[in-house]
Amino acid sequence: PQASLFGSGVPRALGLQAMPVGPDIIDENPGTPSTAAAATPEEALNTEPQDESPTKTSRGCLFVQEVRTTVRGSLREARVPTLFSLVVGMVLIALYYGGGAATRPAFDALAELKSETGLWFAVVSTCLFGGVLPSMVMAATGGLQRPYGVNLLFNVVLWALLGLCVDKLYELQGILFGDQQDAPTIVRKVLFDQFVWNPFLSVPFLAVTFRWRDFGFPIRKGCQDVLRPSSLSLAYCSTLLTCWGSWIPGTS
């Protein structure tokens, strides 16, 4: 999962909410007449090549340019939320280790509550802070897509599922690498998180899921546009790079 509470990067909710990888950045109706000057990147990618070698080069350049533009915009919008998350994390660490007897009981109570409630703690807390609260703020500031109810439900269900998956991911990392808090263990966990979990499991799922949302949650008609290879590749690469830019410093 990707950082930032309210930015449009791979999450707008913690870096995953409103990555513009669907119709926001690509014309998904290739049948619409357009001039060469107004052609979208995807129309250019789908143009029949007249000279195979230059066209392949042009397609690659257009793809890289589109990924760069999307990632730059996402990271720019996620700067403040990501910085806020880092500051909050450092404050919590300082309170835990530096607060002594004044703050330690509160953290111990949270740990005990999680131990007693198991997965429910992860599901409810992630759903609340990753889905409900950011969606409410986005609705108030005009950033939540319409219809509000459907997108709020989508965010709640998605973050509940992510909370469950990430909780199990941390359990697996504890088995694989141990629960020590030393630098080598943290490095191994971050590397596994960012270069195994994200590229092979989390990001493919999120790229498809967010495109499905951006196209209005189609069931049958429209699914071919959601799964269009060129656009899905763009969504995957943009989401992965945004994840790395937000979460590598965040999880470290």
Image: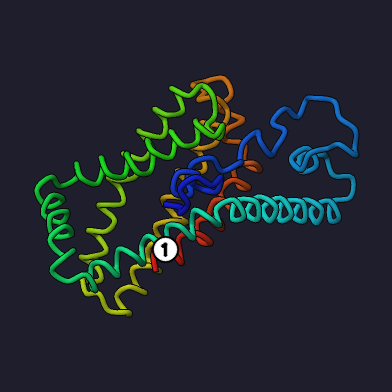
Question: From the image, which quarter does the C terminus lie in?
Answer: bottom left
Callout 1: SS: helix
Residue 124 picture quarter: top left
Q: To which residue does mark 1 refer?
A: 87
Q: Residue furthest front?
A: 102
| Pick the front one: 136 or 35 | 136
Residue 35 picture quarter: top right
Residue 200: x and y in percent read: 44, 54
Mark 1 belongs to which amino acid?
Val
Q: Is residue 245 above or below residue 56?
A: below
Residue 217: x and y in percent read: 50, 25
Q: Residue at x 46, y 65 (%)?
A: 248
Q: Is residue 99 above or below residue 5?
A: below
Q: Is residue 208 visible?
A: yes
Q: Is residue 195 visible?
A: no
| Image position of 85 (left or right of 18) | left
| Pick the front one: 130 or 35 | 130
Q: Residue at x 48, y 57 (%)?
A: 82
Residue 111: x and y in percent read: 15, 56
Q: Mark 1: few, some, or many residues within 10 Å (few <14, many ≥20)?
A: few
